[in-house]
Amino acid sequence: MKGLILLDINVQEMLFQFIGGLGIFLFGIKYMGDGLQKSAGDRLRGILDRFTTNPLMGVLVGIFVTALIQSSSGTTALTVGLVSAGFMTLRQAIGVIMGANIGTTVTAFIIGIDIDAYALPIIAVGAAAIFFFRKEKIQALGQVIFGFGALFYGLDLMSIGMKPLRTLEAFQDLMLSMSDNPFLGVLVGTVFTLIVQSSSATIGILQELFAQGSLHLDAALPVLFGDNLGTTITAVLASIGASVAAKRAAMVHVLFNLVGSIIFTILLIPFTKAVGLMQHTLLLNPEMTIAFAHGVFNITNTLIQFPFIAAIAWFVTKVIRDENQSKVLSPAFKLSKLEEIEPIENR
């Protein structure tokens, strides 16, 4: 009985540390992004509006804006708004969405920097800048620093909470199953990201599991693909009840990540070998290895699909039709309108 109570306490402690750490991590990302956005002001929307003159520029702008606000969903939402307002074509928006997927890998690279031990002093510096200075720019910078520290502190708490998982037989069996069946790994990554609503958080967790040795590389990479696929739910939810342009942009996001996940799952064995070789050649730590794999996945996926932007735009336009436009173009609609107009000689 005593052992059972001790086990319950350990499980409770593990869950509290993991859930609390996840909350602090998500808050850190949002707070850091909000601080960066305050520093940039309203210029972000202007950048998206002015510099997305073609799909290639759209990709570059998508990378820049997402790296700045630390949210591919935020970039996609801004893009959808501009498409709905008629300031951006669907083709330009596709480029921005592709760039947003590359830009979101910056968070994984930040996590790859091993500065967990300095998280609390960084938080203290950020808090001092927020509370002891009245200048808005310094306060915004303090927000960025505070969020940066909170990100690492939350990650450290999650890491501590996840360590006991390695001793659980059910968890070990799941990891072995994911190594044998990559589609299960993709499913796990997708579902977890759907629940958490942040690919940055789930990839951060994946980096910690890989660093602890709880996951082998061939099991970690399919989860990474699933994380990228699961993040599209934010755009899908945002497009519910929205304009046709918003629905099309959301579908582009889903299609882009779905195609990439399928391609890389099929090529899992050579991709795993390439990532392993990169890890040993560049002497990468485990967290940075996942960050590089994430970057390679999104950059390669963009390079593969970029030449087909026109085809993607055509496809989503055919699948998600504008009912008003269909009525205007419909022969039956035209005939009904002609029948309403009496010939001049009959009047």
Image (cartoon, grey):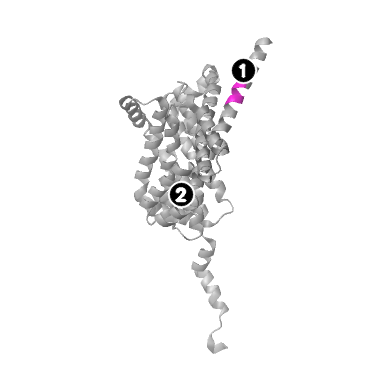
Is residue 123 positioned above or below 303 on the image? Answer: above
What span is in magenta? 13-17
Residue 287 lies in quadrant:
top left
What is the residue that sits farthest to the top in this orientation? 2
Location of residue 23 in the rendering, given as x and y in whole percent from the top left corner: 58, 33
Front in this rendered view, residue 54 or 171: 54
Identify the main secondary structure in magenta. helix
In the orientation shown, which residue stands out farthest toward the right?
1
- The answer to whether 340 is drawn above or below residue 198 in the figure is below
Which mark is first along the chain, 2 or 1? 1
Q: Amino acid at mark 1?
A: Asn
> Closer to the camera, 221 or 137?
137
Q: Position of residue 79 (x, y in %)?
A: 48, 52
Report whether residue 183 is seen.
Answer: no
Residue 10: horizontal and vertical position, in percent?
61, 17
* Mark 2, other Cα within 10 Å: few <14 / some 14–19 / many ≥20: many
**Residue 4 percent coordinates (x, y):** 66, 13
**At numbered mark 1, what does the secondary structure look like: helix, strand or loop?**
helix
Kindly indicate whether the residue at mark 2 contacts the one at mark 1 (C-beta within 8 angstroms): no
Q: Which residue is mark 2?
A: 252
| Above or below 330: residue 51 | above
What residue do we see at 37% from left, 46% from top?
305
The N terminus: image quadrant: top right
Q: Residues within 10 Å of mark 1 (few under 14, many from 20)?
A: some
Q: Is residue 239 magenta?
A: no
**Residue 58 visible here:** yes
Q: Is residue 61 left or right of residue 14?
A: left
Distance between the Cα atoms at labels 1 and 2? 44 Å
Which residue is label 1 attached to? 10
> What residue is shown at x 41% (from left), y 52% (from top)?
312
Q: Nearer the viewer, residue 124 or 227?
A: 124
Residue type at tag 2: Val
